[in-house]
Amino acid sequence: MAHDKVSQEFGSLLFTDADMQERLPRPTYKKLRSVILDGKPLDLDIANEVAHAMKEWALEKGATHFTHWFQPLTGITSEKHDSFMTPQGNGTILMSFSGKELVQGEPDASSFPSGGLRATFEARGYTVWDPASPTFIKDEVLCIPTAFISYTGEALDKRTPLLRSQVALEKQAKRVLALFGQKPSRVVTNIGPEQEYFLIKEEDFEQRPDLILCGRTLFGCEPSKGQELDEHYFGAIRPTVNNFMKELDDELWKLGIPAKTKHNEVAPCQHELAPVFEQGTLAIDNNLLTMEKLKLLATHHGLACLEHEKPFEYVNGSGKHDNWSLSADDENLLEPGDKPGENLRFLVFLACLVAAVDSHADLLRMSVASAGNDHRLGANEAPPAIVSVFLGAALSVIVDDLITGSDVHGAKRTRMDLGVPTLPAVLRDNTDRNRTSPFAFTGNKFEFRMCGSKQNLSDPNVILNTIVAEQCDRFASDLSNASEKNFTKEALKWVIDTFKAHERILFEGNGYSGDWEKLAEERGLPNLRTTPEALPAMIAPENIELFERYGVLSQAEAQARYVAKAEQYTKILNIEARTMLYMARHMYLPALFTYSSDVASSVAAKQAIGIKSAAETEIVEKLTAGIDEIYAATNSLDEINTTAHQMKNKPQEQCEYYCNKVLPAMARLRSAVDSMELICGHDWWPVPSYNKMLFYV
Ligand code: ADP
Ligand code: MG
């Protein structure tokens, strides 16, 4: 056994498979494994034994409570702590935990968003243990990952559809593999989420209601310096930040989260953390835990962690790259491989992905739509709002050859057989880093780069899994009657036809350029610039049919998710608008009254002794005009936002109104305030400036 600190502590707060094996009687352990691996039903006897073992382990680790840990539609995680303590009626207690308590919980569902699935009179909801996800201890609480469903069995959370989409993809991918003579026991997705975030001084954070209430600055003039010197990216990490990162690593490692890479990002104060990839559900759980720890631990170091997609104008925002691959019993199906016989299989999966993204670009775009992410997508710093696929030079050549080949069955076959074995070596060195592509092949995985930093990655992965399942299904069905002799030929033809049919989604150029926008339009690719434009894809009839076909979401569940997303968008913008009004009326205007009156007093004092000050007089005039404009913009925003807020039961119209009317009114107010920040005295300005927040950490 290793004796270094990291090896010893890694996973010490995680109830691992090894712990279960050690603590459970052999037959119980085996039954539990068959529940996890083969989906066998769980009987209460087993649950009781597992609960007992978990509790004993948790008590040894100092835990006092347990909780069902779940992911309501807010996207964050929820928990309610119950103590293991059970009074015995004679002044003593027992620490107990039953199988029933492990398996099922009953939180009041009425206080979570449900998109109308569950009215308050039928508030009952259940949390149900997901035995495939390990339990862990957080702050002396045993956390049990659970799904959250309504009384009538509809999903009220982010985990349930993710699990369903994984089941659908596994089933269809196994059908594809069977045609290649493979019978893996498991096919799973792997996810490596790269998390970006900002760190600023807590004392600055505390002085800004916009950061506290909205997670982003709603005001602030351009800093004197931005990211133009490119000196922050990969720069030396400052001591305070470094201490924070060390504590974070320690805490994450204890939870068994394989935090691996940390570095400074492009914008000042911006950083990134990437773990080693893991199985999909686990990777997403661990990303949510990481986000929670980022926020909490920052405060130990006098820092505030900002996870919003766009905390500051004028510098880059934050994203979360969803590195995604598919593997069959630990073999990566997106690895180009070096055995010729396996390359056809690789090309089939590659074609499936390309077709999936092209057929459902609207759904992928929808899955990352939020008020926060609207500031990134299409704003020349993150991927554009247009979805396209980047394959890299080496693969593009092969795909081009396949598409343009005149004699597919002759010459191209030969080229395939001869050319492909050399592919891997070339590929590894040659997948150039096109940072502008929203969906890029990077060696042996795809990287979906449109996700927002604050987002729960379940949504995009539900879509990804479902649309790839559809294409695997298509391949398996199309090829089901191919004779063994003709299989290779027909499979290759399928690959070529698929690339031909979906060629328009392939783009190797600069995704930020205006030319691409035009070209994409000519190709008929959707360009959904804002959340209100993107959300309706969730309930388009053909998309609902897709969700239902693969058992991922019912019509009612899809509709509810659409409503919940629309509500979240309008609620966030309403809070932002109100925060702006609050800051303008209670902070900026009073500060400007004081400052302008101080300068005016100086003008008057000088005049009294016969000195004329043109500069001061001009400044007072500018301040007065600025105050008038802020006042007018404030009243206008108030009125428009009130109208927006009162729109009821029309989610689409309300989103559009917020987007087209409230956002411009917010921009007007911001511009009025920011132009006054440029001339107001530093000591009079009520909040820390961009110069201060971004560079004095
Ligand atoms: P980048 O070039 O984008 O920095 P890295 O190789 O550092 O890429 O990986 C970024 C993330 O992708 C990490 O979380 C890593 O574990 C993950 N990753 C690597 N291989 C795979 C894979 N086969 N499937 C899913 N994620 C992967
Ligand atoms: Mg990356």
Image: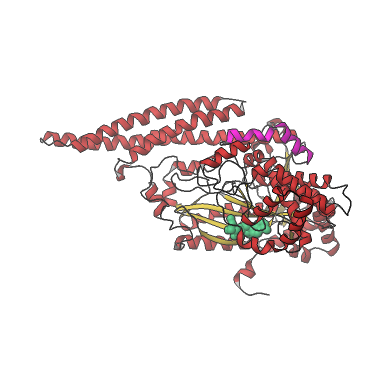
Ligand 2 positioned in quadrant: bottom right
Q: Nearer the viewer, residue 171 or 299?
A: 171
Residue found at x 64% / y 57%? 394
Q: Tell me, yes or no, if residue 109 can be seen here.
A: yes
User: Is residue 255 visible from the viewing direction of this image?
Assistant: no
From the viewer's side, name the closer residue of 540 and 443. Answer: 443
Q: Position of residue 632 (x, y in %)?
A: 38, 27
- Of all residues shown, which one is farthest toward the left? 610
Q: Please, is residue 341 above or below residue 567 in the view?
A: below
Q: Position of residue 564 (x, y in %)?
A: 64, 35
Quadrant of the image containing the N terminus: bottom right
Looking at the picture, how far across and down is residue 137, in whole percent? 65, 58
Vertical order, 218 against 696 (above or below): above
Specify start and end residues of the magenta stretch as a single range.
531-550
- As drawn, is 641 to the left or to the right of 129? left
| Left or right for 263, reference 563 | left
Q: In this view of the protein, which residue sits in the foreground, 242 or 51?
A: 242
Left or right: where does residue 362 sit relative to residue 246?
A: right
Assign the magenta stretch its main secondary structure: helix
- Quadrant occupied by the C terminus: bottom left
Percent across and percent down for residue 543 are 72, 36
Q: Does the magenta run of residues contain 175?
A: no
Q: Is residue 534 magenta?
A: yes
Q: Where on the picture, by quarter, is residue 355?
A: top right
Give the quarter of the image for residue 154. Answer: top right
How many numbered discs, if any?
Answer: 0
* Image coloring type: secondary structure
